[in-house]
Image (cartoon, grey):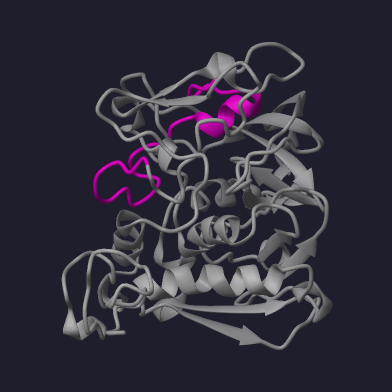
Amino acid sequence: MYTSSVALAVLFAMVSSAAAYPGVKPGPIRKLITIDMPVPSGSHRFKTDSVGSPPATKRMSYFVERGLAITHGDVIFATEEDLIHDSNAQRRSLSVFKSDNQSLWPAGRIEYKWESEDAKGMGRLEAWTEATKRWTDMLPFLKFNENEPGESMEDDIVTLVPTEGQGSCYSPIGRSQNSRHNQIMLDNDCGGAGTYTHELGHTLGLYHEHTRPDRDDYVIINCDNVMQSSDGPNDCSENCSGNGCNFARLADDKAKWSGPYDSLSIMHYGPYEFAGGNGPAIVAKDGVTPPPRHHTFPTVQDAKRVCTIYGDDCTGVCGDGVVDKGNGEDCDDGNNEDGDGCSASCKTE
C-alpha cells in the first residue's frame, strides 16, 4: 500500500461531462478529488518545466462513478480502490497515459458485449451501431465483434454498461488490462451517436486533442471560465486542480500525437465544455478553425492517427480524397457521406 504517498485534496464541483457530445448540458454535482500520483524515480514520461530530474508526482483529478475513478472528464482510469489502496495503481498511472502494444486491440478487432439485452434499449443500440459505422466507414480494418451478453467483466471483452440520467458516457483508453474497469458506460442521455463515437475514439487509443503538448499554439484555454471548484480558482496547468485538470497538457511521449493539431477532431472539447457560464473555456487563435459545439464524426486526421497507432494492421483511410484499391475503395471523394455517388465507405453508389 502507498496511501501515505498520495496527497488528496477533496474538491466539490458541478461537473459538466466532457463526453456530453453533441450537446453541452450541466451534469450532476460530483465530488472531485485532486491527487498527486506517485511516479517512480527516473521516469521521464511526465512533463516538467524544470531542467534535470522529472517531478515525483503527476497531478490529476477524478470523480467516482459506480466505484470507478473517472479522470479527464470521461476516461475510466481504474477502480477507486485500486487508485487509492493498490500498489498496482502506480503502474496503471504510467500505462493509462500512453499507447503501447498491450493497450491495442489485436489486429484492430474490438471484442465487446452488452451487459444484458435490456442494456440495448432507450436508443443505445442504435447509437452504438451508428458510432461503430462512423469508424469502420473510415477505417475498414477495424472490426467490432459482438459477444453474448453477460454481467461479468472480462479481460479481453469490453462490456457495454447502461446508465440513466447521468448525461455522461465513459470509457478507458485503449484495451484495458484489468477486467474490473474493462467497460464502457453508455448513458441514455449523453449525446447519442456523437458521444458514442467520441468514446470509441478513446477505446481505440485516442486522447483528448486539446491536451496535446502543442495546443497553446492553436487555442487559448480560458481557465477563469472553467467551472469552479468550491475551494477557489481552477488551475489548468500541469499543477492542475479540480476541473482545470481536464485542460492540462500531456507530455509529448504519453501518446502518439501524429499529424497536425486538429481543432475539428471528434476528440477535441467544444468551446463550452466544462465552462462555468462566463464565456467559452476554449477559444481558437487567429487563423485556427474554432472547435464546434457539436462533434459528430471522426475527422480524417482522427482516422489517420488511429491508423498510425495500429501500424501494419491499418489498410488505409476512406475519406482522405485518395482512391486506395488496397483499402477496398471504389472511389474516394474526400468525405464520408452517402448519397453523393460515393458512399461513406468509399463504394460507388
Residue 76 image position (x, y, % from top left):
65, 52
Residue 110 image position (x, y, % from top left):
52, 77
Q: Is residue 240 magenta?
A: yes
User: Residue 162 falls in which quadrant of the image?
Assistant: bottom right
Q: Residue at x 58, y 25 (%)?
A: 244
User: Residue 106 falls in which quadrant of the image?
Assistant: bottom left
Instruction: Give the total of numbered labels.
Output: 0
Between 177 and 91, the one nearer to me in the picture: 177
**Is the residue 274 above or below the residue 341 in the image?**
above
Q: Residue at x 27, y 51 (%)?
A: 258
Split into 4 quadrants, where in the image is the N terminus? top right
Q: Residue furthest bottom?
A: 148
| Dominant secondary structure of the residues highlighted in magenta in the image | loop
Taking the image as drawn, is residue 58 in sight?
Answer: no
Split into 4 quadrants, where in the image is the C terminus? bottom left
Residue 71 image position (x, y, % from top left):
63, 42
**Is the residue 56 above or below the residue 108 in the image?**
above
Q: Residue at x 32, y 24 (%)?
A: 285
Between 47 and 236, the one nearer to me in the picture: 236
Which residue range is magenta in the image? 236-263
Between 177 and 309, the one nearer to me in the picture: 309
Between 248 and 228, the one nearer to me in the picture: 228
Taking the image as drawn, is residue 74 in sight?
Answer: yes
**Is the residue 30 above or below the residue 78 in the image?**
above
Q: Residue at x 43, y 36 (%)?
A: 211
Query: Would you say 148 lies left or right of 205 here?
Result: right
Residue 316 image position (x, y, % from top left):
25, 73
Q: Is residue 36 magenta?
A: no
Q: Residue furthest top?
A: 232
